[in-house]
Image: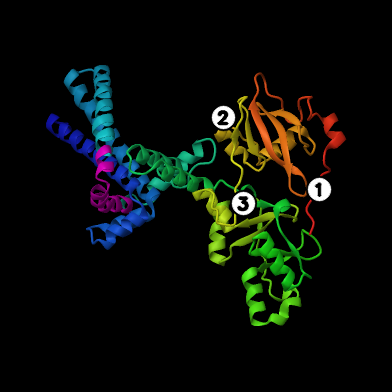
Amino acid sequence: MSTGWGVAAVVVLVGVGAMLSAVEAATSTISHLRAESLLRQGRRHADRLLRVAAEPARYLSTATLVGVVAETTATVVLVELLRSAFGAVWPALLVAAAAMSVIQYTLVGVGPRTLGVQHAEAVALAGARPLQALEAVLGPVPGLLILLGNAITPGRGFRHGPFATEARLRELVDLAEEDAAIESDERAMIHRVFDLGDTSVREVMVPRTDIVVIDAGATLREVESVALRSGFSRIPVLGEGFDDVVGISYLKDVAGRLFDDPGARDLPVSAVMRPAAFVPDSKPADDLLRDMQARRTHMAVVVDEYGGTAGLVTIEDVLEEIVGEITDEYDTAVAAPEQLPDGAVRVPSRMSVDDLGELLGMPLDDEDVDTVGGLLSKGLGVVPIPGATTTIHGLQLVADSTGGRRNRIGSVVVSRVSGPPDGPGEAGQPAGSLDDASDGAAPVSTSSS
């Protein structure tokens, strides 16, 4: 190989790798909606970019494969050129390794990727056509290599390769916040959208102990009264028991019927109730949101693994996981965490374990329970009474106050403990020990109609 042709080949191959690196970085930042916007603006090659944005993993894997081939070939050619110049292999290998490391990091990695992100639209539009051409030429080759990589990689692989993952998108969101492109609350909201797929219905539902229900034999006048007193416009209708939800009563339907026919006040609620929707408590929250949108329903009855009623979930409960608490003029304010003088914090028993971990600035996770009250009960092994104390996950939990007609624990005082934490059931001996709890603990009860 002549020196001139060899140098030209190295320059061309490095240029190809740099171009693909820039296109890959730019395409990763272009969403399908943004590509549609460019198409409406009449930008050139926007139709091609729209097809790329519809299947980004497919095209990014192709770009990655061709880039690797180009950089590897450039390295081989450079080694051959240096071997001819030095007359020895090892000096040629060392110099080529050093030179290509610098070239690949700066001229292929940092520089082109920076340009790709800075001028994402222009680079992505210009690179859409070459990407489609490369994908057409290579066909299934990138996919087959991805399957091979997944086969030799421990754990479950990615069907389209690890080139457009959720982690990458999260990183882009964080970078956008650092560059002041989005606000911190917008960043948090976007992250919560990603987290929605990992959130089960059980984590967002209203538990059965807090549900307001009516019997199927109740009259429309009674239903109207319950709805007005409770503030709920949709109320489950029970048949033979709490696990037999036969329908949902809508205040709008009841009021409409009574307005049209005042004499219908003594009709049973079954005359106007609608069918209830049922979902398993293990269903992902994002799937539930899509189902509710498709079925045009705002409420569903949550069923546990044994077929019993576990609670209720509304579309508002799911949306609150993204945008935060939604309240109106009739909602009762939820008690906020209170910092105590001794360094402990008083929190509502309904606070989630994850929120408690964020409040205390420590990783806190429990597969068995979702709330602080559930964590307290798990540590004690009995239904807690005021003053009951347990230590679990390095925290001391003290049952603080009761409320409601069942006198459930309403708040819990939480403080860190020094030394090795006790496991579940290894409660400390003060007021909340198992012996003390057996004297005054409230009996375990379930809701009834």
The quadrant the C terminus occupies is: bottom right
> Is the residue marked by circle 3 packed among few (<14), some (14-19), or many (20+) residues within 10 Å?
few
Neighbourhood count class around disc 2 (C-alpha, 10 Å): few under 14, some 14–19, many 20 upward: few
Q: Position of residue 48 (x, y in %)?
A: 29, 57
Locate residue 193 relative to residue 392 in the image: left or right: left
Q: Secondary structure at mark 2?
A: loop
**Disc on the earlier residue, 2 or 3:** 3
Marks 1 and 2 sit apart, C-alpha to C-alpha, by 33 Å
Q: Is residue 70 left or right of residue 240?
A: left
* Residue drawn at the location 78% of the way across and 53% of the way down: 447
Q: Amino acid at mark 2?
A: Met
- The range drawn in magenta is 114-136
Q: Is residue 101 visible?
A: yes
Q: Which residue is mark 1?
A: 445
Q: Which residue is mark 3?
A: 332
- Which residue matches tag 2? 362
Q: For the residues marked 3 and 1, what is the alpha-carbon distance in whole angstroms?
A: 25 Å
Q: Earlier in the sequence, mark 3 or mark 1?
A: 3
Mark 1: give few (<14), some (14-19) or many (20+) Cα within 10 Å.
Answer: few
| Residue drawn 24% across the image and 42% down it | 19
The picture places residue 413, in percent across and down from the top left corner, at 67, 32
Between discs 1 and 2, the one toward the N terminus: 2
Q: Nearer the viewer, mark 1 or mark 2?
A: 1
Q: Is residue 267 visible?
A: no
